[in-house]
């Protein structure tokens, strides 16, 4: 499984990313290893050509079920893409689902079904302290990417402050 192209691993991630609709699938691939192999494969195949270029997200994880949950980047309007790529922490994109995760040692992980799947932060400065987070999940040829990382304690503090004001 290690000698595949990044596109193969992208397909595996898109098809087998855990959601509530997949209880019938009993033999899930190890997505933690898949992300690791995808990064290695990207380094072998594309790193020398793309170097430090910005990698455009191809898909995002949406709110629908099954394969309809995959939202192609071209289906997002320009405003939503700007909100995602410019890192507005309080941005809400209606058709995308926020994923729960965790930041440890400036590394972001999506926490799904007991797995901690490594995810690259779109804006590394937004993953500066450890804690529970949520984010929009995008996929590019290098692997999964976390957009608009929001710390959950900030969200609960903001809600409690809003309740006091009202």
Image (spheres, rainbow, N blue to C red):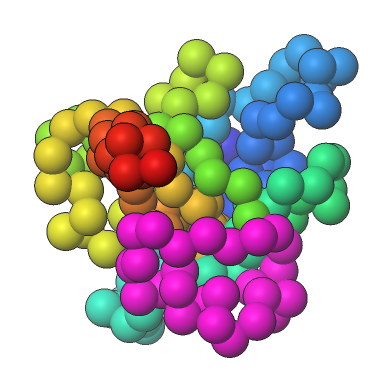
Residue visible at 84% across and 41% down? 66
* In the depicted structure, whether residue 67 falls above or below residue 131: below
Residue visible at 58% across and 62% down? 93
Locate the N terminus by quadrant. top right
Task: Please tell me how many numbered marks the rendered image carries.
Answer: 0
**The magenta stretch spans which residues?**
71-95
In the displayed structure, does residue 97 sit left or right of residue 153? right
Q: Position of residue 15 (x, y in %)?
A: 74, 43
Magenta stretch contains residue 117 = no
* In the depicted structure, whether residue 25 falls above or below residue 31: above
Residue 121 lies in quadrant: bottom left
Residue visible at 70% across and 36% down? 16
Residue visible at 64% across and 55% down? 96
Q: Position of residue 109 (x, y in %)?
A: 36, 35
In the displayed structure, does residue 163 sit left or right of residue 141? left
Q: Residue furthest bottom?
A: 78
* In the depicted structure, whether residue 135 falls above or below residue 88: above
Q: Is residue 138 visible?
A: yes
Magenta stretch contains residue 76 = yes
In the displayed structure, does residue 16 sit left or right of residue 134? right
* In the depicted structure, whether residue 83 falls above or below residue 25: below
Locate the C terminus by quadrant. top left
Q: Residue furthest front?
A: 166
Q: Position of residue 162 (x, y in %)?
A: 36, 43
């Amino acid at each position: 499984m290690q000698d595949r192209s990044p596109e193969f691993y992208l397909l595996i991630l898109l098809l087998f990313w855990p959601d509530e609709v997949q209880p019938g699938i009993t033999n899930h691939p190890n997505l933690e290893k898949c992300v690791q192999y995808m990064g290695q494969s990207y380094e072998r195949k594309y790193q020398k050509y793309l170097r430090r270029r910005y990698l455009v997200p191809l898909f995002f994880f949406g709110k629908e079920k099954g394969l309809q949950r995959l939202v192609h980047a071209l289906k997002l309007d320009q405003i939503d893409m700007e909100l995602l790529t410019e890192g507005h922490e309080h941005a809400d994109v209606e058709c995308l689902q926020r994923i729960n995760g965790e930041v440890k040692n400036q590394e972001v992980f999506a926490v799904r079904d007991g797995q901690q799947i490594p995810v690259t932060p779109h804006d590394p400065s937004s993953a500066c302290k450890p804690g529970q987070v949520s984010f929009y999940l995008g996929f590019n040829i290098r692997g999964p990417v976390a957009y608009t990382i929001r710390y959950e304690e900030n969200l609960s503090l903001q809600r409690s402050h809003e309740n006091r004001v009202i």
